[in-house]
Amino acid sequence: MPKVISSEKSERRYRKRSVRGVPLFVGEGAISQMANHADLGLAEGKEVLGLILGEICRDEEGEYSVASGTATAGLDATGVSVRFDPDSLENLFASIDESGGDAVIGWYHSHPGFGCYLSDVDVKTHSGIFGEGKGFAVVLDPSDGTLMVFTVENGKTKVAQMVVSED
């Protein structure tokens, strides 16, 4: 199965990261897009879902990601599950194309009222899309305003560090 972030090493633009050791930098605008979407879902009693768009860069420490925006489309959602509506995928792909981002570097979804974690289904979804050790999963709980970032390695969830930067 092809991965959104390829496991093959490709030449990445060299750009020294502003904070050593941090694998993900997210612009305030992208955080606001995710939080606002999660708040709308909370108001409707539903989870939300979207993709995180940005660029994969490299420096002397290795690869890291810079998130610049999000993309989403129509959802098939309840209070405990969410997926993209199959009829809206064309709109999702158009949104990705229009973003100007280099890559889909992760995904986000909400757990309204349930806290920030990756369920077993989330881990399978993440691994199926990104593979092991690639991509980021942002989980938001809009009921208390929390947000956490994860990666998945060897089938296990790992909390990832993130720096929020001004756009």
Image (cartoon, rainbow, N blue to C red):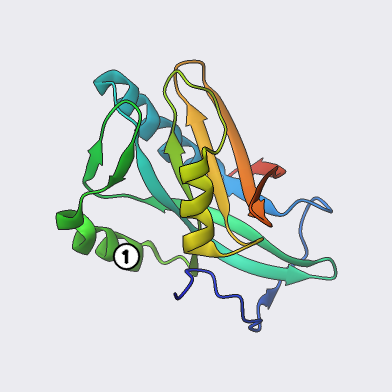
Question: What's the residue at 19%, 56% (across, down)?
Answer: 86
Give left or right: position of 70 versus 94: right
Please tell me whether mark 1 sits on a helix, a strand or a loop.
Answer: helix
Q: Residues within 10 Å of mark 1 (few under 14, many from 20)?
A: few
Question: What's the residue at 49%, 71% (across, down)?
Answer: 3
Give left or right: position of 3 versus 60: left
* Quarter where residue 163 is shown: top right
> Amino acid under label 1?
Glu
Give left or right: position of 63 versus 71: right
Q: Is residue 141 above or below residue 154?
A: above
Question: What's the residue at 22%, 41% (across, down)?
Answer: 76
Quarter of the image where the N terminus is located: bottom left
Number of numbered discs visible in the structure rendering? 1
| Residue 29 place in picture, x, y as percent | 48, 42
Q: Is residue 132 above or below residue 122?
A: below
Outermost residue toward the left in this view: 87
Residue to which mark 1 is pinned: 98
| Residue 39 place in picture, x, y as percent | 37, 25
| Residue 132 place in picture, x, y as percent | 63, 62
| Residue 85 place in picture, x, y as percent | 21, 50
